[in-house]
Amino acid sequence: MSGKIIINIFIILCSLSGWSQTMAYETKKAQKIADGSIFTKIINREAPATIAYEDNDIIAFLPLRLQAPVHLLIVPKKEIHTMNDITEEDTMLIGKMFLVAKKLAQEKGIDKTGYRLTINTNEDAGQSVFHIHLHLVGGEMLPPMLPRKEK
């Protein structure tokens, strides 16, 4: 069997076993992508936002719901739906997102005390806006990202 056939069989088996996104999520995701990203609307100044940083490639702004005293969304101006959609051409852009996060952490005075950087991808991670974005969160002691599991 060729590698391509094996991969296709694996994808089908994963779908059948529940390792894929739910149909409801897929439908909602497709509709949101068709409607266009709220982040693209912010970039195009069609929606309001409190902007903390902007250059030719990246914009950073406050989210609607703060999760910590410092919480910024760092968004590439190029619309990329999920981390699964990045390509080698996006390498510099993705790296720049992290450099902007470092700069903003320094400006907000949380670079020494600590901060968290998070990118959610698809259903199990809770991605609800299909335009990749990096959460910069800090300014207080953050809880563990996931509950610790006993061995």
Image: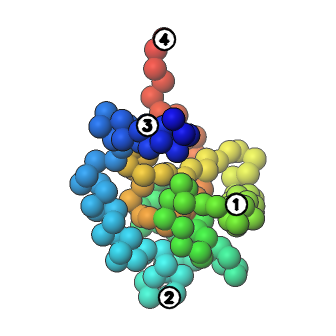
- Cα separation between marks 4 and 3: 30 Å
Q: Which residue is mark 4?
A: 151
Q: CA distance from mark 4 to mark 1?
A: 38 Å
The residue labelled by disc 1 is 88
Q: Is residue 35 above or below residue 2?
A: below
Query: What is the CA distance from the residue labelled 2 to the residue labelled 4?
Result: 50 Å
Residue sitting at x 40%, y 77%? 36
The amino acid type, in three-letter code, at marker 1 is Glu
Callout 2 amino acid: Arg
Residue located 27% across and 61% down the image: 27
| Amino acid at dot 4 | Lys
Sequence-wise first label, 3 or 2: 3
Q: Are marks 1 and 3 in contact (CB under 8 Å)?
A: no
**Number of marks present in the image shown:** 4
Q: Which callout, 4 or 1, points at the residue further toward the start of the chain?
A: 1
Number of other residues with Cα within 10 Å of mark 4, as a class: few under 14, some 14 to 19, many 20 or more: few
